[in-house]
Image: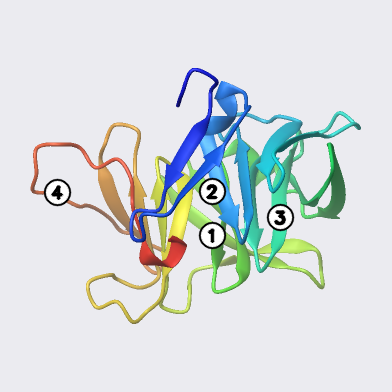
Amino acid sequence: MGSHRELHICHLLTGERVRLPDALKYYYEGIIFAGDLILSFNRYHYHNTVHYCRHCREARCDEGYRFRDPIFVTGTLYALIYPNHCLAVIELDNNSVVLLFLGGEPSAEIVQNCSMLRLAECRGELLLVTAVSYPVGYHVFQWQSDNRKWVRTTTLGGCSLFFNILQFAGCLGPDHPTVRGNCLYIIKSNGQCIKYSLVDGSSHELVVDYPARPRAWVLPSIC
């Protein structure tokens, strides 16, 4: 980041570089890509503003709604809306954020018994992942667009989801022999790395044989 708060992004595999100028510092906490679009946002709190770059604009939700955890799935930008955590499509119209509400508010029981609500994606399917306080574990819900509701699932078709400090990082398919299918691979804030099975609810710590703590998954599927 330079003196004018420019964000410089380098592709780890190709070396290609892009620049996101004239942005506020707090937007750098979360960044997602979709084609030629770069979107930056605050990933830890609900906000009503995003910064995006095709021509480097700031967009605000004029209706005052706050949202978090935006994610692109098959070219559509989704987010959770505060305070009921309902699902909405985000459309960027110059300097405005337009919300198209889809419904799907999680039940009070789900919200009260979880410490995390995160959107994820698997093979073009939109998912909601929750960290359950009791019994300790994780639940995955699949979005049913016809019924406009979340339906719990215990299978990902052999795929696995990866999270960096409970933020969705990517999905790997069943053709990776060293990755166990239908699991969540999660790096926690304390550096601990765990593998959680959706099938039997078991959780195992993954020991990394190097002195530094693991901080982020870097997956070919998101590069």
- Which of labels 1 and 3 is toward the front? 3
Label 1: how many residues lie within 10 Å, few (<14), some (14-19) or many (20+)? many
Amino acid type, callout 4: Val
Mark 4 vs 2, N-terminal side: 2
Give the spatial CA distance, label 3 vs label 4: 34 Å
The residue under label 3 is 77
Residue lying at 64% horizontally and 40% vertically, measured from the top left: 111
Quadrant of the frame with the C terminus: bottom left
Q: Residue furthest top?
A: 3
Separation of residues labelled 2 and 3 (CA atoms): 20 Å
* Identity, as a three-letter code, of the amino acid under mark 3: Leu
Q: Give the amino acid type for the residue marked by disc 1 in the picture.
A: Val
Query: SS of the residue at dot 2?
Result: strand
Evaluate whether residue 59 shows in this view.
Answer: yes
Graded by Cα atoms within 10 Å as few (under 14), some (14 to 19) or many (20 or more), the crowding at tag 4 reads few
* Image quadrant in which you'd find residue 9: top left
Any mark on residue 208, and which?
Answer: 4
Identify residue for label 2: 130
Q: Nearer the viewer, residue 113 or 20?
A: 20
Q: Mark 3: few, some, or many residues within 10 Å (few <14, many ≥20)?
A: some
The residue most toward the right is 63
Q: Nearer the viewer, residue 190 or 49?
A: 49
